[in-house]
Image (cartoon, rainbow, N blue to C red):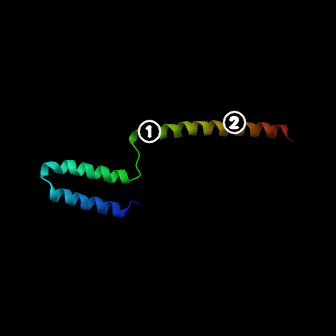
Amino acid sequence: MLNQKLFDDLSSKLNEAVNSGPAKDLEKNMRALLAQGFAKLDLVTREEFDVQTQVLARTREKLNALEARVTELEAQRSKTTP
């Protein structure tokens, strides 16, 4: 689960940003605070996710090929052993 302290810290910092700066700086402050909050989370970029998805797909293909090969070898073995 997500750390409650992280959200409390983020909330307090957002409140500080709203109370201490003019409205034009609010977006800048919020972006910085959110970036800081997200940096504490264990997140991956979309690019990293896509790369791992491709790796997983290739691994599944190899696993399927190996399973088929094992099945074939077991069938050959059962034919040769009485």
Label 1 belongs to which residue? Answer: 50
67 on left or right of 80: left
63 on left or right of 20: right
Q: Position of residue 46 (x, y in %)?
A: 39, 41
Q: Please, is residue 24 above or below residue 3 in the view?
A: above
The mark closer to the camera, 2 or 1, is: 1
Crowd around label 2: few <14 · some 14–19 · many ≥20 (10 Å): few
* Kind of element beneath mark 2: helix
Label 2 belongs to which residue? Answer: 69
Going 75% across and 37% down the picture, which residue do you hit? Answer: 73
Q: Please tell me in which quadrant of the rendered image residue 49 appears.
A: top left
Query: Badges 2 and 1: C-beta atoms under 8 Å apart?
Result: no
Amino acid at dot 2:
Arg
Crowd around label 1: few <14 · some 14–19 · many ≥20 (10 Å): few
Q: Measure the alpha-carbon separation of dots 2 and 1.
A: 29 Å
Residue 77 numbered tag:
none
Going 15% across and 59% down the picture, which residue do you hit? Answer: 19
- Give the mark nearer the N terminus: 2 vs 1: 1
Q: Where is residue 60 in the image (x, y as percent from the top left)?
A: 57, 39
Amino acid at dot 1:
Asp
Quarter that holds the N terminus: bottom left
Going 34% across and 51% down the picture, which residue do you hit? Answer: 38
Q: Where is residue 33 in the image (x, y as percent from the top left)?
A: 27, 53
Q: Please, is residue 1 above or below residue 39 in the view?
A: below
